[in-house]
């Protein structure tokens, strides 16, 4: 009987520990990496605690694994957990020569360049993810090639360079 009570108490302790580890999180995370600086914004609630984090880091010359390690350290210090990724839906077969990602992409783009300032606006769905990007750049004195390289860098970082065609390139 003594062993039975011990087993019941231990299983109750394990159950209580597991229940305490499940914390409800409602967080908005934003990471912007331009190759030189990385801006990390995290806000919301985790459990009963409010979280607000907004920092920039000089990451020039860093590898992707170093950047990922930094983001993990930030999450650990804030005591937040990344949810497990949702399962990927099955991909239907496509005809040869048809890019399935481009077929499922819906992208709105706007590029306005007045010679001094260039505004880039991209929004839509690509690779089953919704995104929105809007930024203004000082391009005074930049050549067409430099501007095209800037646009390419932005579309590459958003993962939409295959879906967005820039006139003049």
Image (cartoon, rainbow, N blue to C red):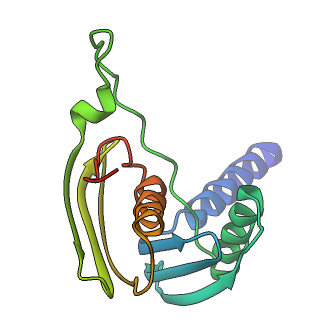
Residue 59 falls left or right of residue 150 = right
Q: In the rendered image, which quarter contains the N terminus?
A: top right
Q: Residue at x 28, y 47 (%)?
A: 165
Query: Is 134 left or right of 37, judged from the image as shown?
Result: left
Residue 34 placement, left or right of 123? right
Position of 137 with respect to 68 (left or right) is left
Give the residue drawn at x 36%, y 41%: 162
Exactly how many numbered labels are in the figure? Answer: 0
Residue at the location (23% across, 82% down)? 114
Quadrant of the rendered image containing residue 117: bottom left
Name the spot of residue 11 as percent of width and height, x first.
68, 50
Decide which of 112, 27 is in the foreground and name it. Answer: 112
Does residue 75 lie above or below 136 as drawn?
above
Figure check: 91 above or below 52: above
Observer-nearest of 27 and 91: 91
- In the rendered image, residue 10, in percent from the top left (x then y), is placed at 74, 53
As drawn, 139 above or below 85: below
């Amino acid at each position: 009987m003594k062993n039975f009570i011990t087993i019941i108490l231990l299983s109750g302790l394990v159950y209580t520990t597991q229940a305490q580890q499940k914390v409800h999180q409602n967080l908005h995370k934003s990471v912007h990496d331009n190759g030189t600086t990385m801006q990390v914004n995290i806000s919301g609630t985790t459990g009963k605690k409010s979280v607000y984090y907004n920092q920039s880091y000089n990451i020039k010359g860093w590898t992707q694994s170093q950047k990922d390690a930094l983001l993990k350290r930030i999450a650990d210090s804030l005591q937040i957990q990344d949810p497990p990724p949702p399962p990927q839906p099955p991909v239907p077969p496509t005809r040869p020569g048809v890019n399935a990602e481009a077929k499922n992409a819906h992208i709105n783009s706007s590029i306005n360049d007045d010679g001094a300032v260039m505004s880039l606006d991209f929004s839509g769905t690509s690779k089953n993810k919704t995104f929105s990007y809007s930024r203004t750049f000082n391009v005074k004195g930049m050549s067409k090639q430099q501007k095209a390289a800037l646009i390419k860098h932005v579309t590459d970082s958003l993962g939409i360079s295959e879906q967005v065609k820039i006139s003049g390139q």
